[in-house]
Amino acid sequence: MERMTKEQNVLDYYVLCSRLKDVVRTGWKDWHVRRERVESVAEHVFGVQMLAIAMRSEYQYDIDILKVIFMLAIHEIGEAVIGDLTRFQIGAEEKEKREHDAVHRILGGLLDGARIEELFLEFDAHQTPEALFAYQCDKLECDLQCRLYDEEGCVDLAHQEGNRTAEDAAVAELLKSGASWSEMWLQFGRQSYPYDEHFRAVSEYASEHTLRAGK
């Protein structure tokens, strides 16, 4: 019976988290990204882990990179239950409550669930060196994906009917300056998140260069 329970726990957790493969990132829907296939939450998780590896490599952060990768692997698991909610849709406190409740339920069936949940909460607080590094990766990765979609011409700023994000005061002000969609988001990130000098430098470089140019 114990073996069957463990096997069921493994499968239950795997199947639940696999939902993230089919959860499209809300931001791409809000901005009416015109593309046959847009990024899922699971693909964002992959992307942010790859960004973390590159940032650690090039800037030699004194952090436990394996802990960071683990944090990033689980940082969106709550969205398997509540969906991808953005800061422009719901208040921060309500979003945090829903997400924490969902993560607690998801991890409750695992023997290591409490320890994994502690790691999730550490990431969410972004106070330790690993958590703050992971948090910066999470935010920058989204803006870099915007840049890639912008290079493909996937977003028409003249047709954003029903886009509540575009009505946000800070977003609207940046767009009025004449910035492109991705330039706006990269600048928004530098204004809104606690980027250190290295994350800021990568963001600024991405604003000034074509990401796909060298590959």
Image: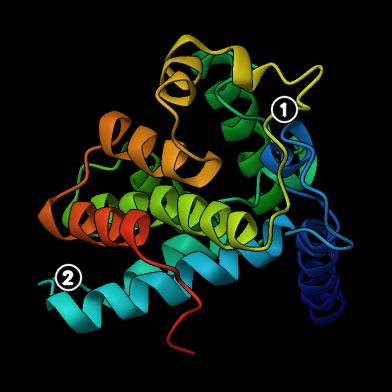
What label does residue 158 carry, if any? 1
Q: Please, is residue 57 above or below residue 146 in the view?
A: below
The residue nearer to you, when weighing 74 against 140, is 140
Q: Quadrant of the N terminus?
A: bottom right
Count of numbered marks: 2
Q: Quadrant of residue 201?
A: bottom left
Q: Is residue 64 left or right of residue 70?
A: left
Residue drawn where x is 11% and y is 54% of the image: 197
Q: Is residue 167 left or right of residue 58?
A: right
Residue at the far bottom: name it.
215
Q: Quadrant of residue 90?
A: top right
Distance between the alpha carbons at the discs numbered 2 and 1: 43 Å
Q: Residues within 10 Å of mark 1 (few under 14, many from 20)?
A: few
Q: Percent position (x, y) of residue 87?
A: 55, 23
Give the foreground label among 2 and 1. Answer: 1
Residue 112 seen by the camera: no
Q: Percent position (x, y) of residue 45?
A: 58, 63
Q: Amino acid at mark 2?
A: Ile
Q: Amino acid at mark 1?
A: Ala
Q: Going from the N terminus, do you reach mark 2 or mark 1 first?
A: 2
Q: Please, is residue 133 above or below residue 3 in the view?
A: above
Residue drawn where x is 64% and y is 58% of the image: 149
Q: Percent position (x, y) of residue 11?
A: 84, 72
Which residue bears the numbered disc 2? 63
Residue 83 seen by the camera: yes
